[in-house]
């Protein structure tokens, strides 16, 4: 007689990880972004005309959202992930993350070369 656990193990298949669903905040921000693309300028104009005090308050308020989120990355791996996610690659694998890091290094080297050429032309 086989042990019950042995029977369960032989039938158990490893579960494939589910794709990470966007958070409620991410979904809300995407919806707000889509709505703003359609109605944004009209909504701003209406706010300026109906509530100029609120319009000025919002315009003068510093934003608390990071410009691109990269400043929150702790290491190059997180930057690689963020780079891939910025183009819609939701759940990148390790090979893709490493390739993104390498591509970023080439990009940075290219930017530095552009800067050096510009400085050489200016005689600095």
Image (tube, rainbow, N blue to C red):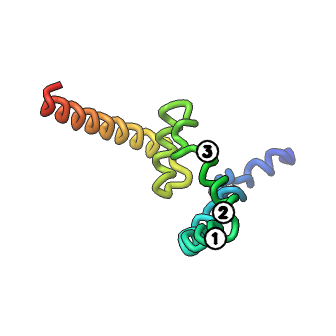
Q: What element carries label 2?
A: helix
Left/right placement of residue 6 relative to residue 72 reads right
Position in image of residue 104 (x %, y %): 37, 40
Question: As displayed, is residue 65 above or below residue 20?
Answer: above
Residue at x 57% of width, y 74% of height:
42
Identified at 19% across, 35% down, the residue is 118
Asked if the residues shown at circle 2 and circle 3 are in contact, with their CB atoms under 8 angstroms apart, the answer is: no
Q: How much space separates mark 2 and mark 3, taking CA atoms?
A: 18 Å
Q: What element carries label 1?
A: helix
Q: How far apart are marks 2 and 1 (CA)?
A: 6 Å
- Residue 121 point in image, percent of width and height: 13, 33
Image point (34%, 35%), residue name:
105
Q: What's the distance in space between the residues labelled 3 and 1, CA to CA?
A: 22 Å
- Residue 16 can be seen, yes or no: no
Give the foreground label among 3 and 1: 1
| Quadrant of the drawing holding the C terminus | top left
The picture places residue 97, in percent across and down from the top left corner, at 46, 42
| Residue pointed to by mark 1 | 49
Q: Quadrant of residue 16?
A: bottom right
Q: Crowding near pointer 2: few (<14 within 10 Å), some, many (20+)?
A: few
What is the quadrant of residue 22 in the picture?
bottom right
User: Which residue is the site of mark 2?
Assistant: 52
Would you say the residues marked 2 and 1 are in contact, meaning their CB atoms lie under 8 Å apart?
A: yes
Q: Earlier in the sequence, mark 2 or mark 3?
A: 2
Residue 22 is at least partly visible in this image:
yes
Task: Choose the circle earlier in sequence order: 3 or 1.
Answer: 1
Q: Which of marks 2 and 3 is in front?
A: 2
Query: Front-most of 58 and 36?
Result: 58
- Residue 62: which numbered mark, if any? 3
Q: Which label sits on residue 2?
A: none
Q: Is residue 98 left or right of residue 5?
A: left
Image location of residue 48, percent across then percent down: 62, 66
């Amino acid at each position: 007689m086989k042990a019950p656990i042995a029977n369960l193990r032989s039938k158990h298949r490893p579960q494939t990880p589910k794709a990470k669903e966007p958070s409620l905040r991410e979904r809300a921000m995407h919806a707000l972004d889509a709505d703003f693309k359609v109605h944004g300028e009209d909504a701003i104009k209406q706010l300026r005309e109906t509530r100029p005090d609120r319009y000025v308050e919002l315009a003068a308020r510093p934003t608390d959202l990071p410009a691109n989120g990269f400043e929150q990355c702790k290491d190059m791996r997180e930057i690689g992930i963020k780079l891939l996610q910025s183009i819609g690659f939701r759940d990148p694998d390790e090979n893709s993350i490493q390739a993104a890091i390498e591509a970023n290094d080439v990009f940075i080297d290219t930017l530095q070369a552009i800067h050096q050429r510009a400085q050489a032309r200016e005689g600095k």
